[in-house]
Image (spheres, helix red, strand yellow):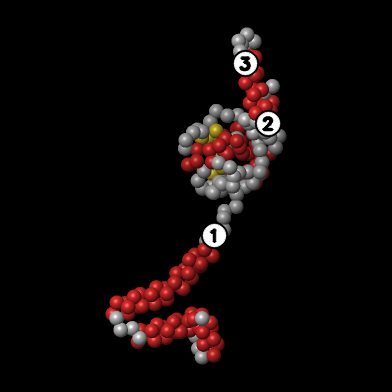
Amino acid sequence: MTLAAAVLFQRMLFKNATLLDSFLSVLGSIVSNAMENIRDPLEEGAAWFGAVDGSRMPFLYNVNFLSFLTMPEKMPFPKTFEELSKVVLRGKYKYLTTIGTVDRELMLKSDIDYFVKLGELIEKNGWEYQFGKKFVELLDGHIDVIVPRSRMNFLLGSPPFVNVKTSLDNIGIWHVGIGMKNNFCCKERLNSAMHGILSSGLYIRNGSMIKHLF
């Protein structure tokens, strides 16, 4: 009702005033009339506190809303290795590989130009990291890391993540297996255990790693 009265008065009486000025005038009139009927000093103090708090709310709402509107949009991130190579070449991103892996070597030997450029930049700048407890701390700012998708999901949980984006590209697929000597004593027990894992579904069914163990 107060807002409706403010709109009506702003159109009819306060044509040169803003809607906010009209609203505050109506609110002040209501409060002042209420004050005249209050006899108890405690009630008067409570009424003034309510009036001040009520007049404060529009300003808080405006500040919060404007802050939300003026926040920059979420920073775009490279979704493919080709996009990544472009932003890395422009110096906007760093691209880290895990110490002890063949990622850099595979890039340098690739037939794809942007993979070769990425490998050269990684080698030139020494962009590598030791995978461990501080892995999450690396994901700060304009930094990309190469890591198996399953390992990242294990550390960070399932996507969508709060402030981490995963690429749409894969650099490659590696199949893993179990190496053993010819005279290994427990082949039957190992085969039985692996068969139980495969049969019970204790693996990622759409993954390529365990499916090709045998």
Q: State the mark number for residue 208.
A: 2
Secondary structure category for the residue under label 2: loop
Give the farthest residue toward the top: 183
Left-right relation of 202 to 29: right
Which is closer to the viewer, label 2 or label 1? 2
Task: Determine the CA span between mark 3 and mark 1.
Answer: 59 Å
Quick check: 182 left or right of 71?
A: right
Mark 3 secondary-structure assignment: helix
- Image quarter hosting the C terminus: top right
Tell us which disc is closer to us: 3 or 1: 3
- Mark 2 and mark 1: Cα distance apart in space: 40 Å
Is disc 2 in contact with disc 3, using a CB cutoff of under 8 Å?
no
Residue 16 visible to the viewer: no
Comparing 30 with 118, the one in front is 30
Q: Residue at (49%, 33%) from the top-left corner?
A: 132
Can residue 58 be seen in the rendering of this structure? yes
Q: Mark 3 highlights which residue?
A: 189
Residue 72 disc label: 1
**Dot 3 amino acid type:** Arg
Q: Earlier in the sequence, mark 3 or mark 1?
A: 1
Sooner in the amino-acid sequence: mark 2 or mark 3: 3
Classed neighbour count for the residue bearing mark 1: other residues with Cα under 10 Å, few (<14), some (14–19), many (≥20): few
